[in-house]
Image (cartoon, grey):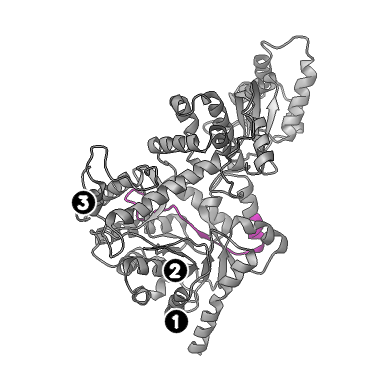
Amino acid sequence: MPKSPSSIRSLADYKEFQRRMCSVLFRPLTTTDEMQHQWSDGTSVSEFVESFVKPNDRLTSFERLEIYNRQYWFRALDSMSEDFPGLCALLGQKKFHALSVAYLTEHQSASWTLRNLGSRLPQFIEDNPQLTKPKTAMAQDMTRFEWAQILAFDEARLAPLEGDGLLGSDAAIMRLGLQPYLSLLELHYEVDEFALALKKNEQSMRSGASNALNEASKPVASKRVKAPNKRKIWLVVHRFHNSVYYKRLEREGFLMLGALRDGLSVAAAVEHALADANAEEDWASKIKMWFENWASLGWFCRPQTRNSKSKLTP
Amino acid sequence: MPANPHNGQTEYGIGIGLRVPHYRHILDKKPVVDWFEIISENFMVDGGRPLEVLDSILEQYRVVQHGVSMYFGSADPLDRDHLKKLKRLVKRTNTPWLSDHLCWGSVDGRFTHDLLPMPYTMSVAKHTASKIRQAQDFLEVPICVENVSSYAEFHQSDMSEWEFLSEVAERADCGILLDVNNIYVSSQNHSFDPLDYVRQVPHHRVGQMHIAGHSKLEKYILDTHDSRVIDPVWAIYAEAIKLCGPTATLLEWDASIPSFDEVHDEALKANRFIQDHAKVAV
């Protein structure tokens, strides 16, 4: 590892200094929560750190930087535990810790807010199934579900379109947007039931994101809650009166909302949703009821286009 | 100074940090508090409960914004998206000034979420001051930079921390948020006299002060904000008030947070020093 510039006389020197320091801070701690003593090529970290950190009469250069190395990892790992308590409960503390360390090693925070720290975790789990096996599919569902709750907590709410505003519009051309805080999840496990059971048992599942405003939650270590059942569900994670909720939908309703979000007209969305539906159902009544319910929950807004010039009708 | 350009010519008294465990008490009981300091980043969101709570607080109280992620000392340029969100919040709160730390915390777009100490050199001071000026111009509100507590010093430094802080503040023409607890913590960790620090910063630039508790470990002091202010920190505060005049003061209590009344009572102890100063001034 090249050493830090011995003096800082330019912005380039300064940037190099910061890169060198971060190369130590971002390295995971040892199993006993200490700073690693060697680089991967076997050379001494102490020697490297001594080139820029002064020792004092109580602490070596290594020990002084170790304080920051620990602070970084404790803070990042705490944030992961707060944001993904269900995943932690599902995998167990040890496996969750190992997953978090692997994730943060590959994906250092790329945002000024810790709220976004876990944004790439769903993809990371998919790309690294060995870290969650044999519960990889379950872990993927739980992670998507918990990330959706973070979004639901503080994403934007646009002016909702009330039911009355939808009446009389031509379904063949009418397009509706969905609120930015709303996530549509097609899941293979009943992670919503699992989350409710955890909440009941542990009273420590939270309804918000880290770095925000709910009570800090404690890591959940529950062996009493049975793993989620394997069953396909269609879930909406949303916000109502500034509280986070989730709600199961029928497959057709889920497909319809997805099609609306993709920009299809209401008529085309209905057609898409009912393509494989049971023809004997009274879909007209059902769809009317769904739309009334969804509108009352404030889920619909004007569709957002790139230039934000959105219209109910084109 | 009671009122100066760096705190928007205000004369705020003793405030406390707005923290989640106290929300219910504040909104229900509406206690008399001169002002609240909010962590800007907690409210730089697009919607949801954080903004609902903030708006309720703003209906009743004066609020000052304090940030933790501007990283004036990072070599990277300022993040425009971050600044835009911050400005949106400034408009919402009408904060008369805002503060952030004299530190760095990110490089190449990767964030440590920590307040890292800087090497104290003239070239770093110039770069940092230039970023503060840019932020101040964009946000259109006075900025006070806060001295951080630290656990490491660098071979590359060629001036003291207070010389560096003064250099940056003068070059940026910005204010100083003088954290007397941080001065104490760093003085113990780096073996300097905290009163040298307090006496040598430009007092006319001090727009706000912070007081807090900390944890004494075996070989160093950790800035934990989880306890009462200790007497040696009050002594530094007394000297700072003597030199700067009655200054808006904020108690930080961020972990093991006790009841609202306990936090507020601890903060109000600062009045003792402010009143002593007034007597001397008479």
Q: Is residue A238 above or below residue B226?
A: above
Label 1, residues with CA under 10 Å away: few <14, some 14-19, many ≥20: some
Which of the 4 image quadrants contains residue A292?
top right
Magenta stretch: dominant SS?
loop
Q: How many marks?
A: 3
Q: Nearer the viewer, residue A34 or A16?
A: A34
**What is the x, y in percent for residue A54?**
26, 59
Q: Is residue B148 above or below residue A25?
A: below
Q: Which residues are magenta?
A: B55-79
Q: Secondary structure at mark 1?
A: helix
Q: Is residue A49 above or below residue A147?
A: below
Which quarter of the image is occupied by the N terminus of chain A?
top left
**Residue at numbered disc 1:** B242
Q: Can residue B70 be found in the magenta stretch?
A: yes
**Residue at numbered disc 2:** B181
Label 2, residues with CA under 10 Å away: few <14, some 14-19, many ≥20: many
Residue shown at 67% from the left, 61% from the top:
B26
**What is the x, y in percent for residue A285?**
80, 20
The type of residue carrying mark 2 is Asn
Q: Is residue A285 above or below residue A305?
A: above
Checking the image for residue B214, the label placed there is: none
**Residue at numbered disc 3:** A5
Q: Can residue B11 be found in the magenta stretch?
A: no
Residue shown at 69% from the left, 64% from the top:
B30
